[in-house]
Amino acid sequence: MMAGNSEGAKKGAQTKKEKYGPDFHSRAGSMGARLGTPGYFGKLKATDPEKLKQISTDAAHRSAEARRARKAQTEIRNDTTETVREED
């Protein structure tokens, strides 16, 4: 069994070339690019840019709140640690 190592990867690459031709990856990539199927946010950008903007704004606010909460917890932990050290 050679899965998960460089020898297996080389053998797999060789097998794909033999089965599907040497340009397999470039053809597969061009098919995906030609389809141009956007994900959820790409579709939202095309159909409802205001909703996308609101989702982005909400996520930024939640991220900032989480950052402030982590900072407060760190400050509390550091203050507690220093108090304990002073008592010792």
Image (tube, grey):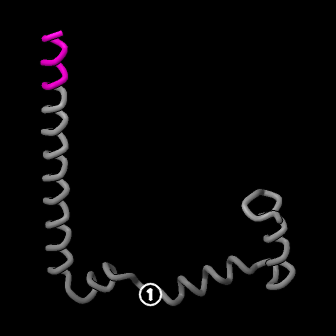
**Residue 86, image x and y in percent?**
14, 11
Picture quadrant of residue 63: bottom left
| Residue carrying label 1 | 37
Q: Position of residue 22 (x, y in %)?
A: 81, 77
Amino acid on which disc 1 is placed: Thr
Give whichever of 4, 86 is nearer the camera.
Answer: 86
Q: Looking at the image, which is closer to me, 24 or 1? A: 1
Q: Magenta span has 20?
A: no
In the rendered view, tell whether residue 6 sits above or below residue 46: above
Q: Which residues are magenta?
A: 79-88
- Give the quadrant of the C terminus: top left
Quadrant of the drawing holding the N terminus: bottom right
Above/below status of 32 relative to 15: below
Q: Which residue is at a point 18% across and 73% down the rendered structure image? A: 55
Query: Residue 14: where, in percent of width, then height?
Result: 85, 72
Q: Position of residue 40 (x, y in %)?
A: 33, 82
Q: Secondary structure at mark 1?
A: loop
Q: Is residue 8 left or right of residue 40?
A: right
Please give the name of the residue rendered at 78% of the width and 57% of the height, measured from the top-left corner.
Answer: 6
Q: Give the dominant element type of the magenta stretch: helix, strand or loop.
A: helix
Q: Is residue 80 left or right of residue 10?
A: left
Q: Is residue 84 magenta?
A: yes
Left of 83 or right of it: where is 26? Answer: right
Residue for point 54% across, 88% down: 34
Residue name at image x 82 percent, y 82 percent: 21
Sort mark 1 into few (<14), some (14-19) or many (20+) by Cα contacts within 10 Å: few
